[in-house]
Every structure is written in structure tokens, then in C-alpha cells.
């Protein structure tokens, strides 16, 4: 059987970063910068006050002390956005608001709390040093310097920086469009009545959400039955709208394993067994024109979930133009003994907790690949290597942290 690492490497060979496009700021949210951004201006662009108070010459208020204030005439009132005040003569002051341009001649701001708050004349009770409460032009960003590098993920802070340097749009690799399809005649839409032998469909909700959590625009196409013509027609239909297609079900050895049957015929998708538990039957390749990457995951819900984190997630990172890093991991002590099949690497659902002695991993009692309840409780996947069949409690293991919402 193929190793997990080899399967990831093979997938990454067929998946490349999606092409960059210029997008308006909020549409670029969640994208990855495809340009390095330099600021065309200094930030701040002008000296301005960091407090509501009075712009003064520091020398004029050097003698001020509580009880014996220096009183100055107020010659201007400067709100933020008002650059019309000109210079203030020596021995005067200007009422100034946070963010307002410093008037020429003033070199410091006295916060309003240190004054009587006067409108025509202001009594100042504290001396200030030159530069007090003044934000100098360029002290945040000098004109022409790099503020964001290619490869940065465009989140809230990056959008703030882009807007602050005057950008309305930016070149990014946008969030990849992931189309999620499930197959199986037994599936019924949740909320609908269910008949004997049927189950409510769950994989496509899980995968759509997981892909969104991984920074993609994911669409749940819903599910299709086990008829080859429908599967092919559906794939043709979604290719133009997808940067990657993820399917579940129909990839093992059964008589109705339609995904495998249909895609094997095309010759562009490989079906293999990976030495992993759960998630052994896997397929990947490309479909349609333009050739669109497709990953076919097993139908068992837990297998599908684990496959997403091991195989789909790196592919999504690659599409985004990010390093295909694995889930973050910690070393943890097993709270219970565990077993694992020889020759397959197990990913056991577990609850990892941190205390004074470090991390502990409590494996879920129900580890079946259909047992979803344990999945919802778990916050980690404990890795049991291929050549290990059992481990006692207390043994140290690698635990992959599952992303939290
Ligand atoms: N003879 C063999 N049988 C199986 C093997 C094998 O090697 N030889 N492998 C087993 C393993 S391991 C897995 S994993 C599954 C994978 O099966 P498929 O990918 O073909 O998936 P299905 O047969 O369609 O479904 C499996 C299981 O999952 C349920 N399911 C499917 N889709 C959904 C969905 N969207 N939402 C919720 N549940 C879903 C389905 O009802 C089945 O119970 O094959 C084993 N068999
Ligand atoms: O690989 Mo299957 O996922 O063992 O249940």
C-alpha cells in the first residue's frame, strides 16, 4: 500500500496555485497576495495630534504647574480633517482633536485633562515635552517601503493596511472554489422523510464546512445517485465552476462504486489504497476541460473527514499559493491503551488537553469509520505509526490538532 506522504506528494504534483486576479478589497478577503505592496505615501501623511487637547509650543507652557497654570489665548479650533488652520503665533494655542493636523509653530499637545478646557482662553496645569502627543509623519510607514509581502493571507489586518495606503483593489490568488459532491443511492437530504435502508446525507456538509474553514469558497452540490451517466453529467456541469472537486463515496470494491467505475474509464484519475486507517481507498487526478483537480474520498463519514485533513487540505493550501503544511501537532501522553492495524497508520479521534504535566490525549471509545459521534467530541487525531499495533497508556504520541471554528 502507498504511504500517506507519497499520496500527498502525488496529489501536490497535479495541483498548482490558481491564477491571481485583481480584486476589490473585501472580495480579496481570504485570498493570498500575489504582489508585494509598497506604500505610495508616508503614514501618517502629516504630523497630527494623538489626543484631544491643545496644540502649544512646549516652551510656552514650561512654567505650568498644578495650582499655577499658564493661560494662553485659543486662536484656532482644529477638528480632524481640517488642514486650514495655518500657523499659531508664539504665546497662543489651538484647540485640537485626535487625528487633526498639527498647526505650524506648535510642537506639542497638552491633553484636555491637564487644562480647564477653555474655548477662548485655556489654563494649562502641566508642562509638556516637545513632541508630546504628536504623531509624526512617516513614523508608521515611510514612503515607498514594503507594507505587505507576496504570499501574505489577506485578513482583517492586511485589509486595514491596504486601505490605509490608499489601495482600492489588490492582486491576489482568490479563495479557491471547491465543489463538493457525494454519491450513493441510499442518501436522503436531511430534513426529508427517510425510508428503510436509507441514511441522511452528511459528508457533503462536513466537507463543505471543512473547505470553508481552510480558506476556500466551498459549494455543496449535494448528492447524486449511483448512475454513471448522472455522475459524468454532473462532473461536466461543475467543472467550469470549480478549482477543485471533492467527491465522497463509491471508491472501494463494491458493485455500485460508481465514482471509481466512471473515472477509471477516463484515465485521468488514479485509484489506490493508502496505508491509512481510516481512509484507505483514495483517488485523485483531473477531470474535464480545463483539466480540474478532483479528489475522491471514501464514503464512510469518518474516513472522509480524516481524508480531508490528510489529503484535501494540503491540496487546498497549494491552490491558494500557500505552503501545503500539515495540521499543527503536539506530543501528548496517551490516557488509555490503543490498538492499530499492522501496516496502516492510524489516525485515532481523541480529546487532547493541556495541564501542568503537558498534553494528554484521551482516544475516543468509538473509533469505527462510521461513528460520527466521537468525531464531534474530538479535537485531535492521534497518530499511530504503521509498524505499531498497540501502545500502553502513558506512551507519548503525536497528536494533530483539528482546526476549531
Ligand atoms: N470488500 C471491500 N469492501 C470495502 C473495502 C474494501 O477494501 N473491500 N473498503 C472499506 C473501506 S476501508 C471504506 S472507507 C469504504 C469506502 O467505501 P466507498 O467510498 O465506496 O463508499 P460507499 O460504499 O459509497 O459508502 C461507505 C459508507 O459510507 C456511507 N456514506 C456514503 N456517502 C455518505 C454521505 N454522503 N453521507 C453519509 N454517509 C455516507 C454509506 O452509506 C456507507 O455506509 O468501503 C469499505 N468496503
Ligand atoms: O479506510 Mo476505511 O476508511 O478503513 O473505513
Image (cartoon, rainbow, N blue to C red):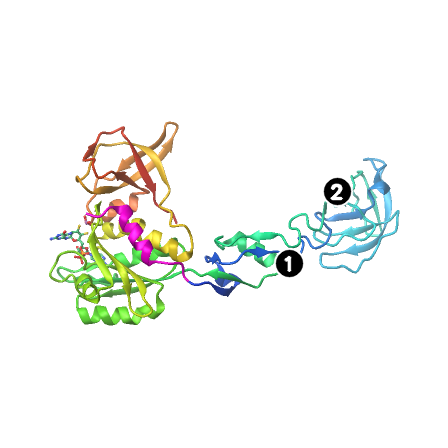
Tell me: 144 left or right of 97: left
Q: Nearer the viewer, residue 186 or 52?
A: 186
Give the label, 1 or 2, closer to the camera.
Answer: 1
Return the disc, 1 or 2, that comes first in the chain's sequence: 1
| Total tally of numbered discs in the picture | 2
* Residue depicted at x 27% and y 31%: 335
Helix, strand or loop: magenta stretch = helix
Give residue 78's quadrant in the image. bottom right
Q: Which residue is mark 1?
A: 40
* Residue depicted at x 19% and y 47%: 1
* Residue depicted at x 33% and y 37%: 352
Q: Is residue 106 visible?
A: yes
Residue 312 x, y percent position in the rendering? 31, 54
Give residue 297's quadrant in the image. bottom left
In the rendered structure, does residue 71 fall within the stretch colored magenta? Answer: no
Please state the extent of the stretch shown in magenta in the rendering. Answer: 1-18
Q: Nearer the viewer, residue 132 or 144?
A: 144
Residue 405 x, y percent position in the rendering? 39, 49
Q: Nearer the viewer, residue 73 or 3?
A: 3
Q: Is residue 381 above or below residue 264?
A: above
Q: Which residue is mark 2?
A: 132
Amino acid at each position: 500500500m502507498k504511504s500517506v506522504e507519497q499520496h500527498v506528494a502525488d496529489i501536490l504534483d497535479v495541483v498548482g496555485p490558481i491564477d491571481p486576479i485583481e480584486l476589490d478589497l473585501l472580495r480579496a478577503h481570504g485570498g493570498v497576495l500575489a504582489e508585494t505592496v509598497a506604500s505610495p505615501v508616508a503614514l501618517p501623511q502629516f504630523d497630527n495630534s494623538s489626543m484631544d487637547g491643545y496644540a502649544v509650543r512646549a516652551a510656552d507652557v514650561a512654567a505650568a504647574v498644578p495650582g499655577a497654570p499658564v493661560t494662553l489665548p485659543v486662536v484656532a479650533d482644529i477638528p480632524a480633517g481640517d488642514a486650514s488652520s495655518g500657523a499659531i503665533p508664539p504665546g497662543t494655542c489651538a484647540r485640537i482633536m485626535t487625528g487633526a493636523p498639527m498647526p505650524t509653530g506648535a510642537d506639542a499637545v497638552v491633553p484636555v485633562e491637564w487644562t480647564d478646557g477653555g474655548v477662548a482662553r485655556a489654563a494649562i496645569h502641566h508642562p509638556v515635552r516637545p513632541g508630546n502627543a504628536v504623531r509624526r509623519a512617516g513614523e508608521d510607514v515611510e514612503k515607498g517601503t514594503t507594507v505587505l509581502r507576496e504570499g501574505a493571507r489577506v485578513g482583517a489586518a492586511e485589509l486595514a493596511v491596504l486601505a490605509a495606503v490608499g489601495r482600492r483593489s489588490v492582486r491576489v490568488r482568490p479563495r479557491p472554489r471547491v465543489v463538493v459532491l457525494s454519491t450513493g443511492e441510499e442518501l436522503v437530504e436531511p430534513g426529508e422523510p427517510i425510508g428503510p435502508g436509507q441514511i441522511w446525507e452528511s459528508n457533503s456538509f462536513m466537507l463543505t464546512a471543512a473547505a470553508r474553514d481552510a480558506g476556500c469558497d466551498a459549494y455543496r452540490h449535494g448528492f447524486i445517485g449511483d448512475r454513471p451517466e448522472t455522475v459524468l453529467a454532473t462532473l461536466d456541469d461543475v467543472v467550469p465552476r470549480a478549482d477543485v472537486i471533492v467527491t465522497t463515496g463509491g471508491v472501494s470494491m463494491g458493485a455500485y462504486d460508481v465514482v471509481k467505475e466512471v473515472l477509471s474509464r477516463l484515465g485521468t484519475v488514479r485509484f489506490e489504497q493508502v496505508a491509512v486507517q481510516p481512509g484507505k481507498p483514495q483517488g485523485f487526478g483531473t477531470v474535464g476541460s480545463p483539466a480540474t483537480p478532483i479528489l475522491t474520498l471514501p464514503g464512510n463519514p469518518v474516513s472522509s473527514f480524516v481524508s480531508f485533513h490528510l489529503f484535501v487540505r494540503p491540496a487546498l493550501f497549494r491552490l491558494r499559493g500557500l505552503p501545503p503544511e500539515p495540521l499543527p501537532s503536539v506530543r501528548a501522553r496517551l490516557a488509555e491503551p490503543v490498538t492499530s492495524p499492522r501496516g496502516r497508520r492510524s489516525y485515532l479521534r481523541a480529546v487532547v488537553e493541556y495541564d501542568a504535566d503537558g498534553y494528554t490525549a484521551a482516544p475516543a471509545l468509538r473509533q469505527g469509520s462510521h461513528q460520527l459521534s466521537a468525531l464531534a467530541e474530538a479535537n485531535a487525531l492521534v497518530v499511530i505509526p504503521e509498524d505499531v499495533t498497540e501502545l500502553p497508556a502513558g506512551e507519548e504520541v503525536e497528536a494533530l490538532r483539528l482546526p476549531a471554528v
